[in-house]
Image (cartoon, helix red, strand yellow):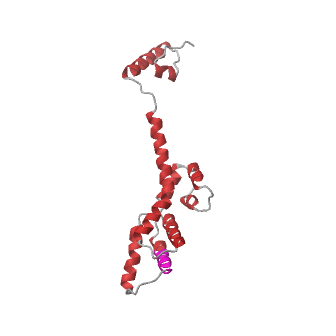
Amino acid sequence: MNANALTKPSTNSPMASLREQSASALKAAIHSPHDPGATLKRVNAVLGLYFDPDNDPETKAAMRQEFVLALASYPDWAVQRAFDAWVKTGQRRPTPGEIVILVGREMKPMTDELARREREEADRRDHRPEITPEQMELSRVRAELARLRNVPVSPDETRRGLSISKP
């Protein structure tokens, strides 16, 4: 699945669909490419909706470039959705920082899902039983004895240090 399929806003339940996605698909969406040309085009369109102060052309171009620079490290889909969200508010002209905040909100469900998965994996690692060095040595010796006698030992018996089972 490509990053574009994850970022389409047509899903009824985005949280449910994010939980169904692989971690690699989520990471691909978060790290998908940024298109400065698309950002500049969208900046021009959105700023054109609002009052345009009487600035010289160089100043206007520099103002638009500030948006492109501020949004350069974010995926294009999140930038476009952030502009969509701003336009829906019907407020004044946005600043680059305000759009960056909205980009973060657009990406938050994905980053939260990845963080949830990492916490669950850490919890699973933390709840594995500890094996003492003595238990490891005992298991090693029993496994070696079983090998020499050609008696199978289950991995569970080896881990717990139980007696050797006979065939």
Look at the image and give the residue range highlighted in magenta.
Answer: 40-49
Front residue of this view, candidates 164 and 10 = 10
Q: Position of residue 134 (x, y in %)?
A: 37, 19
Task: Locate the N terminus by quadrant.
Answer: bottom right
Residue 154, compared with residue 90, is above or below; it is above
Q: Is residue 44 magenta?
A: yes
Front residue of 90/160: it is 90
Compared to 97, does 51 lie above or below?
Answer: below
Picture coordinates of residue 93, whole percent (x, y): 45, 76
Is residue 124 rendered magenta in the image? no
Of the 4 image quadrants, the one containing the C terminus is top right
**Residue drawn where x is 45% and y is 61% of the image:** 104
Q: Nearer the viewer, residue 109 or 134?
A: 109
- The answer to whether residue 67 is left or right of residue 42 is left
Considering only vertical position in the picture, is 32 above or below 157?
below
Q: How many marks?
A: 0
Q: Residue at x 47, y 53 (%)?
A: 111
Is 152 drawn above or below residue 100 in the view shown?
above
* Predominant secondary structure, magenta span: helix
In the rendered image, residue 36, in percent from the top left (x then y), is placed at 44, 71
Toward the viewer: 159 or 166?
Answer: 159
Residue in the picture at 58% in, 56% down: 14
- Expressed as whole percent of the image width and height from the top left, the position of residue 27 reads 48, 54
